[in-house]
Amino acid sequence: YFIVSVMGNNPDKRNGIEVMEVKDAPVSEEGVLVLVATQKIIHNEIVNTLQEYACKDYYCVDEKKLLDGLYSSFYTDSIQNNKILFINMKGMGYGCNPKYITQKLIELDTDKKLDIVWAVSDKTDGFPSEVRTVEYESLDYYHELTTAHVWVDNMRKNSDIRKREGQYYIQAWHGAAPIKKVEKDAEDVLPDYYIANAKRDSKMADLFISGSEFYTDLYRSSFWYSGEIMRTGLPRQDVFFKKEGIREKVYHYYGIDNELSMVLYAPTFRKDYSNEYYDLDIAKVVSALEKRFQSKFICAVSKHPDNRYMNYFFDRNVRYLEVERYPDFQELLVAADVLITDYSGCMYDYSFTKRPVFLYQRDYDSYLKDRNFYIPMKELPYIKAASNEELVEKIAAFDADHFLKRLSQFMELMGNYDDGNASEKVAKRILNIIRGTNK
C-alpha cells in the first residue's frame, strides 16, 4: 500500500497500488515493513504517527542517496536543445498558462523541430498531435525532466527535482488574483516542507511570468525570488480577448441546450478537506438567477484541483453538471454567464468577462483566520453573501451598472499587463532560449 496520514485529496490508487490511511493499514502486524521515502523535514512527523499505531518496523530512506543514484543514471543522457517539458498543476492535464504557451509554440514552430512534452497524471485525450505525453512522476518523467532544455511549470516543484546546468526554468505561476495571502505572506500557516520547496523552486527558476504590477511586486516581496520577471500578462488570460467559438465548444462537450444560460459554481479548497462548506442551494440560486436575468439557467459545478477526489453532496434531484474534469478551466469561465465562488482567484480571471460575480462565503471568519487577504473583502467589487438566503437576495437586487463601475476601478488599480498577446510573447522568448539568443 501507499500509506497516508489523511486521505484528503489523495486518489484511491497511485501507480496501480491502493492508497490507505495509516489508521486502516496493517502497520502493526508482523511481517509488515513501512518505508518512509519523503523529505527529511517531515520524517519525524511520519515516524511519530506510525508509533501512535504501534508500528515498530520502519525504515527512513536516505533522500540524498536515493536521489543521487536516480539522477546519476539519467545524467548519462545529454540535454536535448529542442525539448520543452510542460507541467500543469502537478499533472492535471492540458490547461492554464502552459496550455496557451504550447498552442502558440506549435503555431510558431513552422519547421516542426520542437519536441514538446507534457507530464500528466492521466493520459487523457485532448492533446494536440504535436505534443508527447509522459506519466507524471514515473521513471520516464524523470528522464524527460533531466533531458529537457526548457521547463515550464505553474506550481512549485517537489523536493526531488534537480536542475542541471544548461537547463532553463520558466515559472508560469497559476496565481493572478490579489485575494488570498500566499507564500512568504502566509508563512505562519504553511507547512515547513512547502516553504523549503518554495525557496528551492525560486532558486532554480530563471524567469517568472507576471500578469500585473500587483504580482510583479508580490514576486519580489513574497516569493523568495530576485531573478528576472517577464511583464507580459498571463497566457491563459488571452482567451478572454480571443473567445470566438469557445462557448459553443463547451456547450457541445456537455450537450447543453444553446438556449440555456450557465452559472458556474467554482469554490476553492479548505485545508481540512471538509465538504461541509459546499452546500450551495442550487435550486433556489438557479430560480433567483432566472428571475433576475430572464433566462433559463443550468448550474455547472467545478471542484478545485485539491478537491478533485471529494464528493459534494448536492441534492441529486436538482439538475447540475460536474465539470471539474473539463480539460481547460479558462474555457469554462468564458462559457459561463455568471460565476459563483467563495475565495477562489478565479473571480479575478472572470473579471475580464465583465459578467456578474457572486461570492458565497458562509465560513468567512474562520477562513480569514486561516489565510487572510491582501485586500479586505469589502473593498472588492464582487457581490458577497454569507448564506443561501442572502445570496438569493443579492442576486435579485443585482445592479449591473454599479457592479461594472466598481469592477473597472478595481482592475485599473491592479495594473494589468494583459492585452491578448501574452502567449506569443512567452513562446517567442522560449524560441530565443532554444536558439541561444534569449532576447
Image (cartoon, grey):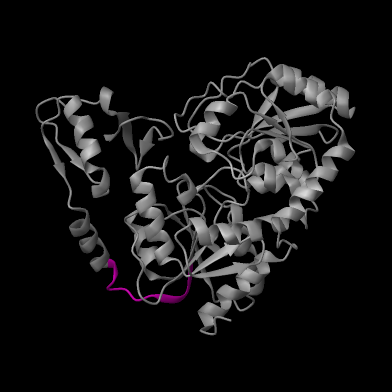
Quick one: 65 or 274, which is closer to the camera?
A: 274
| Residue at 41%, 52% in the rendered image | 136
Q: Quadrant of residue 77?
A: bottom left
Q: Is residue 205 in view from this perspective? A: yes
User: Which quarter of the rendering shows the N terminus?
Assistant: top left
Task: State the image coordinates of residue 108 (x, y, percent, origin top left).
Answer: 65, 73
Q: Is residue 75 magenta?
A: yes
Task: State the image coordinates of residue 393 (x, y, percent, origin top left).
Answer: 79, 20
User: Which quarter of the rendering shows the C terminus?
Assistant: bottom right
Quick one: 238 or 197, which is closer to the camera?
A: 197
> In the rendered picture of this protein, how many numbered marks are placed on residues?
0
| Residue at 67%, 65% in the rendered image | 422
Height in image: 120 above or below 7?
A: below
Task: State the image coordinates of residue 138 (x, y, percent, origin top left).
Answer: 35, 53
Left or right: where does residue 108 sit relative to residue 183? right
Quick one: 254 or 272, which is closer to the camera?
A: 272
| Residue at 52%, 40% in the rendered image | 305
Left or right: where does residue 19 sit relative to residue 377? left
Task: State the image coordinates of residue 168 (x, y, percent, origin top left).
Answer: 45, 72
Height in image: 424 above or below 182?
A: below
Quick one: 93 or 46, which is closer to the camera?
A: 46
Q: Is residue 149 magenta?
A: no
| Residue at 66%, 23% in the rendered image | 386
Q: Which residues are magenta?
A: 74-84
Q: Is residue 91 in view from this perspective? A: no
Height in image: 156 above or below 342?
A: below
